[in-house]
Image (cartoon, rainbow, N blue to C red):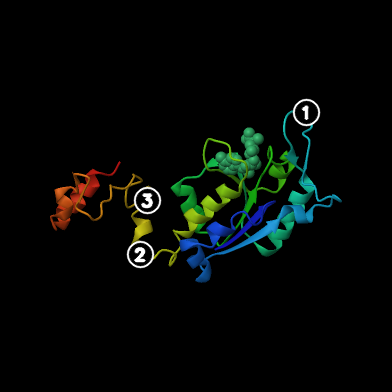
Amino acid sequence: MKFSILTIFPKILDSYLNESIIKRATEKKIITVDFYDIRALSKDKHHKVDDTPYGGGPGMVMTPQPLHDTIMAAKKKNKGPVIFLTPHGKMLTHTVVKRLSKLNEIILLCGRYEGIDQRIRDTIIDEEISIGKYVLTGGELPAMIIIDAITRLLPGALGDENSAEEDSFTRKLKGKKEYPHYTKPAEFRGIKVPDVLISGDHKKIATWRQSKLS
Ligand SMILES: C[S@@+](CC[C@H](N)C(=O)[O-])C[C@H]1O[C@@H](n2cnc3c(N)ncnc32)[C@H](O)[C@@H]1O
C-alpha cells in the first residue's frame, strides 16, 4: 500500500513512522509512505500557503494554488483517491478502514488553520474523512491514524496474523468490542484472574469470552 501525505509539516510524523509495527511494515515493503510539502510548491515569493477568509472572520484559510499543485504532483505518482481529513468528513470506522485497506494507493491531504479553500474540496477531493467529533490543529494525526489502522489489516504486517481478525469491531467479533484480557500474575493487588481462564477448558474459555463481548 502506497500512502502519500500532503502537509505543510512533512517531518511531523517521522518518529511514529519509525517505530514498531509501522516501521517493520515499511521495512518489509508492505507499505510505503511519502510526503509532499505543500509550502514547497507555493508560488508566493515567501512560500505563503494561507490567507485571510473572504467575508471576514477569525483565522486563516489554506490558499488553493499550493494545494492544487501539490495534489497534482502527488497524483502523477499515486493513482489512489485523494482523501481530505476534515471534521466535516465521513466518520472513520472499522468498515471504512477495511474498505480502504483493499486499495493499493491513497493520497491523504492534511489541512491546517481554519481549513482549505472550498474550491479545492469541490473539485479535486475524492473523499472526506473525520476521525471524530472534535477539532484538532491539523490533519496529520488523522492521516497517521488512517495509515496505522489500515497497516495492521495488511497481510504480514502483524506478528500474529490472527490478531487483527479477532480485534474489536471485526466480523469475527460480530462488530462488538473484544473480551477483557488478563496476564500473569494470577493475582494482582488482591484481584484474581477469573477461574475459567486458568481452568484449561478451552470450550468454557471460548464461551466466557463470547459472553464478555460488548
Ligand atoms: C483547526 S482544523 C479546522 C477546523 C474547521 N475550521 C472546522 O471548524 O471544521 C485544521 C485542520 O485539522 C484537520 N482536522 C481537525 N480535526 C479533525 C478531525 N476531527 N478529523 C479529521 N481532520 C481533522 C483538518 O485537516 C482541518 O482542516
Query: Residue at (16%, 55%) from the top-left corner?
Result: 198
Location of mark 3 (residue): 170
Q: Quadrant of residue 199?
A: bottom left
Q: Is residue 51 visible?
A: yes
The residue at the far right in this view is: 45
Can you tell me which quadrant of the image ligand 1 is in?
top right
State the residue in front, 14 or 146.
14
Residue 45 lies, in percent from the top left, at 86, 51
Tell me: 104 left or right of 45: left
- As helix, strand or loop, the secondary structure at mark 2 comes to loop
Mark 3 burial class by Cα count in 10 Å: few <14, some 14-19, many 20+: some
Circle 3/circle 2 CB separation < 8 Å: no
Q: Residue at x 22, y 54 (%)?
A: 185
Give residue 49's position: percent from left, percent from top.
77, 46
In the image, taking residue 176 as reference, residue 118 lies left or right, namely right
Q: Which mark sits nearer the N-terminus, 1 or 3?
A: 1
Q: Nearer the viewer, mark 1 or mark 3?
A: 1
Query: Which amino acid type is shown beneath numbered disc 2?
Result: Asp
Q: Which residue is mark 2?
A: 160
Question: Distance from label 2 to label 1 (Cα)?
Answer: 54 Å
Q: Which mark is residue 124?
A: none
Horizontal arrangement in the rendering, residue 194 relative to residue 8 (left or right): left
Say which residue appears at 25% left-offset and 51% top-offset. Answer: 182
Residue visible at 53% across and 55% down in the picture:
147
Which callout, 3 or 2, points at the residue further toward the start of the chain? 2
Q: Residues within 10 Å of mark 1 (few under 14, many from 20)?
A: few
Q: CA distance from mark 3 to mark 2?
A: 16 Å
Q: Which residue is mark 1?
A: 56
